[in-house]
Image: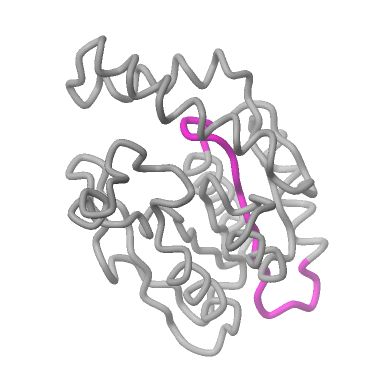
Amino acid sequence: MTSELQALADELVARAQGARRFMVAIAGPPGAGKSTLAERLAETLVQRGETAAVLPMDGFHMDNAVLEQKGFLARKGAPHTFDVRSLIDVVKAVRQADTEVLVPVFDRARELAIASARIVSANDRFILAEGNYLLLNQPPWDSLAACFDFSILIAPPLGVLEERLAARWRGYGMDAPGIRTKLEENDLPNGRLVLSASRKPDRTVAIV
């Protein structure tokens, strides 16, 4: 992955020549390694003397109380369980690069979003937004397309995703029947949607 990271960083720096802010969308199914790629790519850019910040989409999960009220709790993580309007507003504000923007971050251990938990500085040149549906070619998600200068889709085999997701939920203490239900009724359908309904990215990465 090191050589691929270097190649991605090379391309971003080349494409961003002269830009005060350069917005990158990193999309992929749950468990694909989006946050890992975003963090590593940010580190690689910083090592080159650039400034970079990661903007995670997961901070825009609806709260469990809201999901329960709407009857969506079992599908948490599906496109309709995010506060997309707030996400779009924040992405547009970040794109302006005229002031710092406070963004929410998702705490997976507690299954809740923490408001204003990360700073995107006006001086951060590269913004690496990462999330499942940033390239989804369906409304209202498709309105994000104009906000990004470059896009990356992580598209590993479904078998790899299944193994990673099962390991994730085991790590949070979920039993085998619960994991199977979680995978078959939510995570894997969401992953298939990302792989089948995302717009064509500038770069596709097979595995992180």
| Numbered label tally | 0
Which corner quadrant holds the C terminus? Answer: top right
Q: Residue at x 58, y 55 (%)?
A: 47
Image coords of residue 186 (percent x, y): 41, 30
Relative horizontal placement of residue 19, taking residue 168 as reference (left or right): right
- The quadrant of the image that shows the N terminus is top right
Q: Is residue 203 left or right of residue 162?
A: right
The colour mode here is one colour
Q: Position of residue 127 (x, y in %)?
A: 57, 65
Q: 208 and 153: which one is in front?
A: 153
Magenta run includes residue 27: yes
139 sits to left or right of 130: right
Height in image: 129 above or below 17? above
The quadrant in which residue 111 appears is top left
Quarter of the image where one finds residue 156: top right
Q: Give the magenta part as a residue range.
A: 16-33
Q: Please report the residue visible at 59 percent of the width from the left and 48 percent of the height from the top.
A: 41
| Residue 194 in the image, given as x and y percentages of width and height | 61, 38
